[in-house]
């Protein structure tokens, strides 16, 4: 990552410039086993793209000494203490996790039909596993919630409302029943971004298939209730394939229409 990008990212992660400077100083101390002088540390911080004064460096280094994260070795400079190493590694892990989450968020924002299709393909991979785990782990209360969601979905279809939000809630409930927090978080991000895009598409064909999708949901839920992971995966895959096929058809029809009108 370029230095200017590092600083921008750290500005999002930390509240103040002082916190950023402290972290960069700790990282600089982590990178060497020999004592490092304050001037050399200042240069390392500035190589990351952050301008700091010598007085600021000195003050923060004294603070790090007081926290037992660094130690002054006579007149040679400072080294990182075991406590400091543990602390900076924790912060670095948190920052890397934050960066990965941001990358996932950025990648999950679809810009057109093709990216929407890619997003649904990603959902299919995740949801086949959430369905399998839900069949193994779902509680009675979670199964009850799934059936309640199906009834609400059927009601929305009956009164000709857009059933998409309720349909997505069903998938989130299946994920919750899987009791796998990583799958739950990943699916929630994808569904959130999908709903934002779909709200901008007035003629999305999947809205017209609410009755069909509701039947799929019931098959999936019955398999989960019966603790039949194989059937749960089968029905979930068939359901997601139906959604994918509908979007693919809409893309094809859209291209055909543009060609005909050109």
Image (cartoon, rainbow, N blue to C red):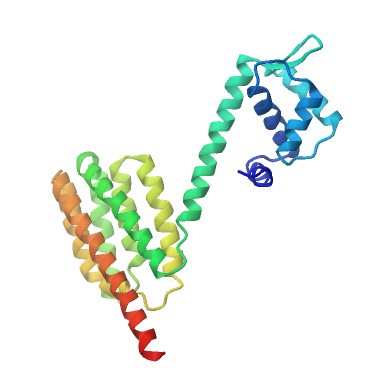
Using the image as rendered, state which of residue 55 and residue 222 is in the foreground. Answer: 55
Q: Position of residue 181 (x, y in %)?
A: 37, 40
- Residue in the picture at 70% in, 38% down: 48
Using the image as rendered, state which of residue 61 and residue 172 is in the foreground. Answer: 61
Left/right of residue 125 with respect to residue 44 in the rendered view: left
Q: Quadrant of residue 236?
A: bottom left
Q: Position of residue 211 (x, y in %)?
A: 22, 70
Q: Position of residue 216 (x, y in %)?
A: 20, 61
Left/right of residue 59 with respect to residue 151 in the rendered view: right
Question: How many numbered markers are drawn?
Answer: 0
- Residue in the picture at 73% in, 31% down: 44
Left/right of residue 207 with respect to residue 51 in the rendered view: left
- Residue in the picture at 80% in, 28% down: 57
Q: Position of residue 189 (x, y in %)?
A: 43, 52
The answer to whether residue 18 of the structure is visible from this angle is no
Using the image as rendered, state which of residue 53 and residue 68 is in the foreground. Answer: 53
Quadrant holding the C terminus: bottom left
Vertical relation: 172 (above or below) 39: below
Vertical relation: 38 (above or below) 103: above
Q: Residue furthest bottom?
A: 261
The answer to whether residue 33 of the structure is visible from this angle is yes
Quadrant holding the N terminus: top right
Q: Quadrant of residue 164?
A: bottom left
């Amino acid at each position: 990552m370029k230095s200017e990008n590092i600083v921008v990212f750290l500005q999002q992660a930390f509240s103040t410039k002082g916190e950023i400077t402290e972290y960069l100083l700790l990282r600089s101390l982590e990178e060497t086993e020999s004592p490092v002088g304050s001037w050399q540390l200042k240069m390392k911080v500035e190589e990351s793209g952050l301008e700091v004064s010598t007085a600021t460096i000195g003050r923060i280094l004294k603070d790090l000494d007081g926290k037992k994260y660094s130690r002054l070795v006579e007149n040679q400079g400072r080294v990182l203490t075991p406590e400091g190493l543990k602390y900076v590694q924790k912060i670095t892990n948190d920052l890397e996790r934050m960066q990965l989450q941001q990358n996932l968020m950025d990648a999950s924002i679809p810009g057109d039909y093709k990216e929407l299709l890619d997003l649904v393909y990603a959902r299919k991979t995740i949801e086949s596993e959430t369905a399998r785990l839900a069949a193994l782990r779902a509680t009675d209360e979670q199964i009850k919630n799934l059936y309640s969601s199906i009834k609400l979905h059927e009601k929305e279809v009956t009164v000709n409302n857009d059933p998409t939000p309720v349909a997505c809630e069903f998938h989130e409930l299946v994920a919750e029943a899987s009791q796998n927090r990583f799958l739950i978080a990943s699916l929630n991000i994808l569904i959130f971004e999908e709903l934002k895009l779909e709200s901008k598409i007035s003629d999305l064909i999947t809205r017209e298939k609410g009755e069909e999708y509701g039947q799929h949901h019931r098959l999936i839920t019955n398999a989960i209730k019966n603790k039949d992971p194989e059937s749960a995966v089968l029905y979930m895959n068939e359901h997601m394939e139906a959604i994918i096929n509908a979007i693919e058809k809409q893309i094809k029809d859209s291209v055909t229409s543009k060609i005909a009108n050109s």
